[in-house]
Image (cartoon, rainbow, N blue to C red):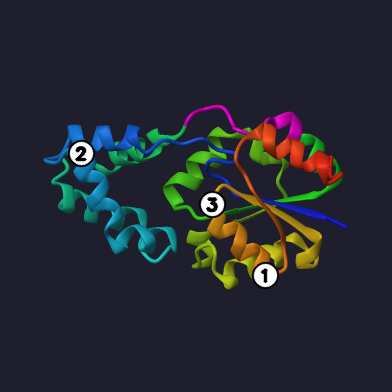
Amino acid sequence: MIKTFIFDLGKVIVPFDFDNALKILESVGDFSSLEVKEKIFASKEVLLFEKGEIAPEEFFEFLKNLLNLRMNFDEFVQAWNSIFSSEPIVSEDLIEKLAAKYRLVVLSDTNKIHFEFIKEKFPILQHFSDFVVSYEVGFLKPSTEIFQVAVEKAECLPEECFFTDDREANVEGAKKFGINAFQFISPEQFEQELKNRNLL
């Protein structure tokens, strides 16, 4: 019997598009948005930032030097958070229905700047009992360690959890840990899957 739902954040609950931030960084630096993307995501600092091993200010200084950015930290925070749209992907109505029957937990690879912004701008998160975020626990999906933390927060057995994520590798990692898991494609597909499993 399922007792807890564990949700990924990005592209499941919270929509985002990195192109918005890349264009801003292009406008205040010396590289095209494509070059900015390649340089950022080729660096180990992104993973260190998401694992909480470097602070937001340190990450900004790294990018400022890497991209020759002409901006201050506060401007960077605004640019870094510009990736998010305002409306959640999964409806708050559906989350409310699930919260009435199950414990809800977030499991997300994210960084401090993004998560603080999401908590402030997405009131849908008020329906969640707990949050497992990579920068706080020091692990990224699909590591065994982060699923262990998520199950502890779920307050039940792995087989009593249902996890959804837009990335197949994370879904497979959850399954290997004994968690019921399903790849999120769209809100319509997800809701139909819940009905098929008699979870709604």
Counting every numbered tag in the picture gives: 3
Q: Residues within 10 Å of mark 1 (few under 14, many from 20)?
A: some
Q: Give me the disc on residue 70.
A: none
Mark 1 belongs to which amino acid?
Phe
In the picture, measured across the screen, residue 192 lies left or right of residue 28, that is right
Measured as percent of width and height from the top left, residue 120 is found at: 54, 37
In the picture, measured across the screen, residue 109 lies left or right of residue 160, that is left
Q: Which residue was labeled with disc 1?
A: 177
The correct choice, above or below, for 20 with respect to 153 in the image is above
Q: Which residue was labeled with disc 2?
A: 71
Mark 2 belongs to which amino acid?
Met
Residue 155 in view of the camera:
yes
Measured as percent of width and height from the top left, residue 50 is found at: 43, 58
Q: The C terminus lies in which quarter of the figure?
A: top right
Q: The N terminus lies in which quarter of the figure?
A: bottom right
In the picture, measured across the screen, residue 118 lies left or right of residue 73, that is right
1 and 2 marks in contact (CB < 8 Å): no
Residue 60 in view of the camera:
no
Mark 3 belongs to which amino acid?
Arg
Label 1, label 3: how many angstroms apart (C-alpha)? 16 Å
The correct choice, above or below, for 76 with respect to 42 in the image is above
- Residue 36, quarter of the rendered image: top left
Q: Nearer the viewer, mark 2 or mark 3?
A: 3
In the picture, measured across the screen, residue 26 lies left or right of residue 119, that is left
Q: Which residue was labeled with disc 3?
A: 167
Find out whether residue 70 is within the magenta segment: no
Name the dominant secondary structure of the magenta segment.
loop
Q: Which residues lie in the magenta part? A: 85-94
